[in-house]
Amino acid sequence: MLSSQPNAADYGVHYALIKETLTLALRDRQDAAADCYRIQIQLATPVSGIRTIVMDSGLTEKTSLLLLWKALEIIARQHLHKDDLVQLFGYYQYKNRYHIAIDYFAPQMQQDTFWTLYQHIAQGTETGEIMPKATLCQRYKCTLATLTQTLVALKAIGFEIRNSNTNKQIKEGMVLIPYPYPTLNERSLQRLTIL
């Protein structure tokens, strides 16, 4: 089990490898919560025999995304000989070698625009490309304000989001979401930039 503090965890991530599937389950201390959402990743090419990664969360907080993805990163480093999620899944300018699907089981998550937009982003059709914000709003059926608020929230928990403020090579009104998972850490210069 991975936890925030030894012997006093406020949450824990249990993981197991069964056949070709790596499963992770994020739970609070009581471990009583039912699954609130599931992220399932199908790998086009197996990594150390793993074809599927299933991450379940009993938490609905936005930071639970960071907890799950960073737990996967720790497991990848310790057991799969990959330094980070980018090494595990591939650099954003290459063709995706994976498919991500998300299911929400908690009713409040199905109605929350943050989670709805993250579901679109995770599916990866707009990740890895510089896109007009207006196009993303049309595809995601949201307002510019909602899109901006969601991108700022994702960046705050470690997702790499780029625009003209963070990268001068990106034109005004455009955005780049390189990865559908958090890649920034507390030392990342991109984390300090403002969208």
Image: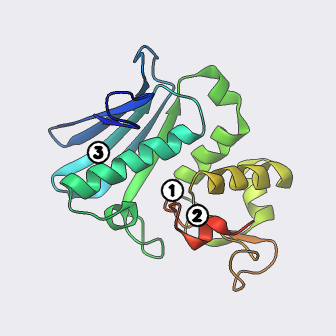
The location of residue 18, given as percent across then percent down, is: 17, 35
Tell me whether circle 2 and circle 3 mark residues in contact (CB < 8 Å).
no
Tell me whether circle 1 and circle 2 mark residues in contact (CB < 8 Å).
yes
Say which of 155 and 147 sits in front.
155
**Which residue occupies 70% across, 33% down?**
112
Mark 2 or mark 3: name the one nearer the start of the chain. 3
User: Can I make out residue 50 in this image?
Assistant: yes
Looking at numbered disc 3 in the image, what kind of residue is underneath it?
A: Thr
How packed mark 3 is, by other alpha carbons closer than 10 Å (few <14, some 14-19, many 20 or more), is many
The location of residue 63, given as percent across then percent down, is: 56, 41
Looking at numbered disc 2 in the image, what kind of residue is underneath it?
A: Glu
**From the viewer's perspective, is 51 left or right of 32?**
left
Residue 9, numbered label: none
Q: Quadrant of the C terminus?
A: bottom right
**Which residue occupies 27% across, 49% down?**
75
Residue 52, numbered label: 3
**From the viewer's perspective, is 25 left or right of 161?**
left
Q: Secondary structure at mark 2?
A: loop
Looking at numbered disc 1 in the image, what kind of residue is underneath it?
A: Pro
How much space separates mark 1 and mark 2, taking CA atoms? Answer: 7 Å
Q: Secondary structure at mark 1?
A: loop
**Which residue occupies 61% across, 46% down?**
118
**From the viewer's perspective, is 17 left or right of 135?**
left
Pointer 1 residue: 182
Pointer 2 residue: 160
